[in-house]
Image (cartoon, rainbow, N blue to C red):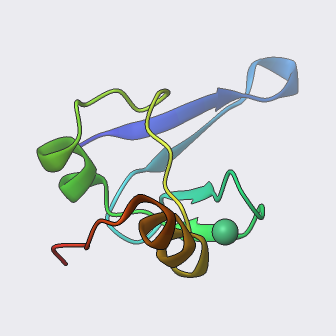
Amino acid sequence: MFYVKEALKDGVDVTVEINDENVFCRCPVCGKEIPVDLESILKEGDGDLFGTAVLCDECAKGWMKNHGKKSET
Ligand SMILES: [Zn+2]
């Protein structure tokens, strides 16, 4: 499994397993929290978690309008 590990104070670590329900990112346009399907990002994207931006539904609609593309999903 994958998990995130964060060091708290006094040598205490917290580890959280990454699953398909606890990964989120913020929409770079409006700042809304969006659940992220890591599997689809890794499959469809270039696997660059830091360079991958996920827009919320509303901003994605606006983006696609501006760019004249349709989503496959
Ligand atoms: Zn947004």
Residue closest to the eye, 44 or 23: 44
Give the quadrant of residue 42.
top left
- Left/right placement of residue 30 relative to residue 28 reads right
- State whether residue 8 is above or below residue 15: above
Residue closest to the eye, 69 or 47: 69
| Number of marks present in the image shown | 0
Furthest residue toward right: 9
Give the quadrant of residue 34.
bottom right
- Left/right placement of residue 2 relative to residue 62 reads left
Q: Where is residue 67 drawn, in percent x and y?
A: 42, 59
- Left/right placement of residue 67 relative to residue 11 reads left
Q: Residue at x 38, y 52 (%)?
A: 18
Q: Residue at x 56, y 73 (%)?
A: 62
Q: Residue at x 49, y 55 (%)?
A: 54
Residue closest to the eye, 36 or 13: 36
Image quadrant in which the N terminus is located: top left
Give the quadrant of residue 6.
top right
Quadrant in which ligand 1 is drawn: bottom right
- Left/right placement of residue 27 relative to residue 31 reads left
Image quadrant in which the C terminus is located: bottom left
Q: Where is residue 31 drawn, in percent x and y?
A: 77, 61
Q: Where is residue 55 drawn, in percent x and y?
A: 54, 61
Q: Where is residue 26 drawn, in percent x and y?
A: 66, 56
